[in-house]
Image (cartoon, helix red, strand yellow):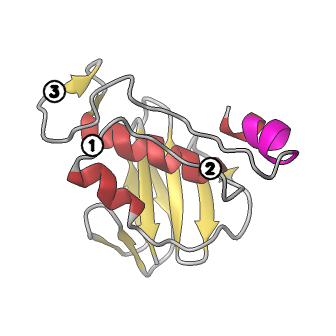
Amino acid sequence: MAIWVQNNVLATDSHGVFLPITACASTNPDVPGTLNGLASSAQYTTYAYASLLMAAAYNGNYLFLGTTDAYSQSLFQINIGTSTGSYGIVSGTHVYSRSFSNGMVLVNPTATSYQVNVGSGFTNAATGASISSTVTVPAYTGLILKG
């Protein structure tokens, strides 16, 4: 949907703003529980944000996460730079990948975890964990990597 709105609305109206809202579930990572037993609220929040980064092409894109908690707000502070190309699927997986000038975004919309070789020099922006070359992208997860 994000890509359709960009191609059919934002591309023809420079004043257009796309505001996806993900408030359909609790996004507060301090609240215990999961979303339909599939993902924690922090995982859901990161997945939603990473998914929009995967598709964002115009400065008129915004994301409302339905909360102002510290975790959600911290995602907006991650500086991965500007996109260096379109998104694509990682060969042999169902993981989507997009490179940025200062990082990379990975999104796994499936119920299967995948190992993805991203090279060296990255850290997981949400956890600060260093990545040597391969990262596990768990099911229903978005990862934002700083490089």
Viewer-nearest residue: 21 or 41: 21
Q: Which region of the structure is painted magenta?
A: 5-12
Task: Identify the residue shown where x is 52% and y is 58%.
Answer: 105
How far apart are labels 2 and 3 at the CA level? 30 Å
Foreground residue among 30 and 101:
30
Question: Crowding at label 1, few (<14), some or many (≥20) Cα neighbours within 10 Å?
Answer: many
Q: Amino acid at mark 1?
A: Ala
Which quarter of the figure has residue 132? bottom left
Q: Which residue is mark 3?
A: 33
Q: Is residue 129 left or right of residue 138?
A: left
> What secondary structure is marked by label 3?
loop
Quickly name the residue at label 2: 61
Image quadrant occupied by the N terminus: top right
Residue 16 position (above or below residue 31): below
Q: Position of residue 122 (x, y in %)?
A: 42, 75
Q: Position of residue 2 (x, y in %)?
A: 66, 38
Q: Quadrant of residue 6?
A: top right
| Labels 1 and 3 touching (C-beta < 8 A) | no
Across and down, in percent, residue 104 comes to 53, 65
Compared to residue 52, the image places residue 109 above or below, namely above
